[in-house]
Image (tube, coloured by chain):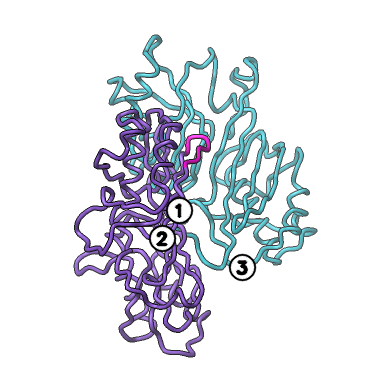
Chain colours: A cyan, B purple
Amino acid sequence: MTLSYDGTRFSGWQRQTHARSVQGVLEEAFRSILGRRVIVTGAGRTDGGVHALGQVAHADIPARLPLPKLHRALNAVLPEDLVIQTLTWAPAGFHARYGAKSKWYRYRIWNHPVRPVMERHWALHVPSPLNLTAMRRCARLFVGRRDFRAFHSSGRCVASTVRHLRQLTLRRNGPWLIIDMKADGFLYHMARRMVGLLLEVGKGRVSPTDCHRIIPPTAPAHGLCLMRVEYGNRRALQKTDRMED
Amino acid sequence: MTLSYDGTRFSGWQRQTHARSVQGVLEEAFRSILGRRVIVTGAGRTDGGVHALGQVAHADIPARLPLPKLHRALNAVLPEDLVIQTLTWAPAGFHARYGAKSKWYRYRIWNHPVRPVMERHWALHVPSPLNLTAMRRCARLFVGRRDFRAFHSSGRCVASTVRHLRQLTLRRNGPWLIIDMKADGFLYHMARRMVGLLLEVGKGRVSPTDCHRIIPPTAPAHGLCLMRVEYGNRRALQKTDRMED
């Protein structure tokens, strides 16, 4: 299934006992429709406040259920800040997390002296001007297969901090500054730390040549959105031994 | 001043004793900064739930106040769902409501089987397909200077129900259907009733040729947004005897 959610009122993807999580709300919806416990596994474990337009998740459910009917029933019980966009049968062996070949995250910045109103929950407000040229110079340094150790927040166990950052682009559109990041995987807080670093450079606090020398701050969650998860061919859908996001 | 607000948690423009209104919140902000009562007059008295990106309002304040400083101070005390975009001195005799030459309202429809998530508070969800050709045929019948009596909800006193509808266009963009309406003025509920009628036609419940014969339903407020108010030259800014929106 592909999912969209407004992360504002979720504590994050992962089920927690005393907090409202995307996984928990989804599993509760499945339980209420199917009358039994269903485990939902997501491609990316988004943090609290992070949004998604194209999160992918899988669940094991009894075969031959009529999917269009189940889709409508689930969306009817899901809250207004979470919706299932598409629901299809996955190929055998499909795993939403281990099978993901690449992820695309977008960070939205409202770069204008006057704060945003309609978009206040899904854009970071930066009132001061940003040096886009310097930010792009810094961004280019990180594209490629590299060790992103400096962008990894502790708290999650990873086998390797090497990732392949395929794209890191900045685009201005009126007051908007849109940062698109595509990689084969993101370490914990990696997307938000890359934005945090770019903002330090954009504000002139760090020069592009010193990019590699600082520990980047973590940009706020509410500007970040998981746009899409891509899967390869059937072989790529097999479970691999990659254990991280 | 030009204003943007998210109408979701406002009971409407107009000050009310026991409800949260845009006018009331603005006047309270002026009072807290200037230490005295200020009356704020808006170009359009938007209903509860209706949004604005370009509402215009005026207020009489002591001359020689430093406007940029006042602007920042007001925005600092205003709540997150209301912001002053620009604040300038108006020409003598300017009146936000009586001087308005034309208004542009936009209505957003999310026309897709799956409901919207991020845009749920500022788009009407219409899951069934809409006949855009029929809607456009109907729309063309209303452009021009006409009596819009059928689109006027009682409850407000008007001298005349004749208005000049300059533009009524429908544009599809993916799941979005955007309806733009420009007129020299709008009667109470006129914009929402025009959309209500177009939706009846789009759903095939009313044929375009019967457009004139029905009393149109009022489309929900949360899809509507006041985009811009236009003023003419200085003469047009003088107070006129038009007493309606």
For disc 1, the chain is: B
**Position of residue A223 measured from the top left corner of the image (x, y, whole percent):** 53, 51
Q: Are marks 1 and 2 in contact (CB under 8 Å)?
A: yes
Give yes or no for residue B173 being in the magenta stretch: yes
Quadrant in which the C terminus of chain B appears: bottom left
Write down the residue under mark 3: A128
Q: Badge 1 local density, few (<14 within 10 Å), some, or many (20+)?
A: some
Q: Nearer the viewer, residue A137 or B150?
A: B150
- The answer to whether tags 3 and 2 share a subunit is no
Q: Nearer the viewer, residue A28 or B177?
A: B177
State which region is magenta. B170-176
- Identified by mark 2, the residue type is Asp
Give yes or no for residue B27 being in the magenta stretch: no
Q: Are marks 3 and 2 in contact (CB under 8 Å)?
A: no
Side (left or right) of A189 relative to A35: right
Q: Is residue A39 above or below residue B122?
A: above
Between the residue at mark 3 and the residue at mark 2, the CA separation in whole angstroms equals 38 Å
The number of callouts visible is: 3
| SS under mark 2 | loop
Quarter of image, res B38: bottom left
The residue located at (61%, 24%) in the rendering is A231
Write down the residue under mark 2: B184
